């Protein structure tokens, strides 16, 4: 029987040298950074901490990640909770990628804690093993917001006109009993 071969991780297998990952939840996020270990050349160093999902806390996180020279930040998409993290970190000049939770969690036997998920996401990020979800660029997101707002305003206007028309139809009997004529409503275009 042959002796098994031991293969060490190679430097060239690492895509990013300094990464961060955030396991996003409703009120907070578990953040893990992976950077070169200053005391042991060639080794990696992980730092994990919790950050509240408030504007000031995420801005402070962005400043820290920029100061640490983080090259890529991975966010796990959880409902809509990822949005504040993505938008604030992106506006700070960081490269941010959004990944689905199934990419990191569908591995049998893995413990299911936020801390370990953040560490796992960071490891996968540094090796470039995650496929990011599409998030439109900021100008497209802004245009979509305006289009949605206009659609909602038009719907509100239509709803108001329909309620007014219903009110007038309901009271039509009163208007006709006074000898008046049937009211007609024309909606503005």
Image (cartoon, helix red, strand yellow):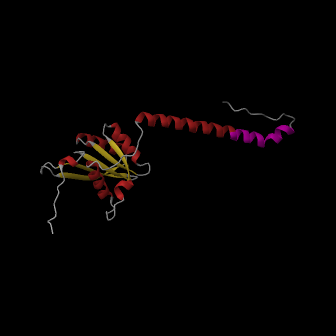
- The spot of residue 185 in percent (x, y) is 74, 33
Instruction: Please state which of residues 164 and 127 is positioned toward the viewer in this rendering.
Output: 127
- The spot of residue 28 in percent (x, y) is 36, 52
Quarter of the picture containing the C terminus is top right
**176 horizontally vs 73: left or right:** right
**38 horizontally vs 16: left or right:** left
Q: What's drawn in magenta, residue-wise? A: 162-177
Q: Residue at x 35, y 37 (%)?
A: 91
Instruction: Please state which of residues 90 and 6 is positioned toward the viewer in this rendering.
Output: 6
- The spot of residue 50 in percent (x, y) is 30, 52
Q: Residue at x 43, y 33 (%)?
A: 139
**159 horizontally vs 106: left or right:** right
Quadrant assignment, res 3: bottom left
Quadrant assignment, res 154: top right
- The spot of residue 172 in percent (x, y) is 80, 40
Quarter of the picture containing the N terminus is bottom left
Outermost residue, front direction?
A: 1
Q: Residue at x 29, y 55 (%)?
A: 120
Is the residue 111 above or below the residue 146 in the image? Answer: below
Instruction: Please state which of residues 107 and 66 is positioned toward the viewer in this rendering.
Output: 107
Outermost residue, top direction?
A: 189
């Amino acid at each position: 029987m042959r002796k098994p071969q031991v293969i060490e991780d190679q430097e060239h297998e690492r895509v990013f040298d300094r990464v961060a990952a955030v396991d996003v939840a409703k009120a907070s996020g578990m953040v893990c950074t992976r950077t070169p270990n200053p005391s042991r050349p060639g080794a990696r160093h992980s730092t994990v901490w919790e950050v509240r999902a408030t504007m000031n806390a995420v801005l402070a996180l962005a400043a820290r990640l920029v100061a640490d020279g983080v090259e890529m930040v991975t966010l796990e998409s959880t409902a809509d909770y990822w949005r504040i993290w993505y938008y604030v970190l992106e506006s700070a000049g960081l490269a941010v990628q959004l990944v689905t939770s199934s990419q990191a969690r569908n591995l049998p036997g893995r413990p299911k804690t936020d801390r370990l998920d953040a560490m796992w996401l960071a490891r996968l990020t540094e090796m470039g093993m995650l496929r990011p979800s599409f998030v439109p660029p900021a100008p497209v997101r802004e245009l979509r917001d305006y289009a949605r707002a206009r659609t909602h305003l038009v719907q509100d206007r239509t709803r108001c006109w329909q309620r007014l028309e219903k009110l007038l139809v309901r009271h039509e009997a009163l208007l006709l009993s006074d000898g008046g004529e049937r009211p007609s409503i024309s909606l503005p275009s």
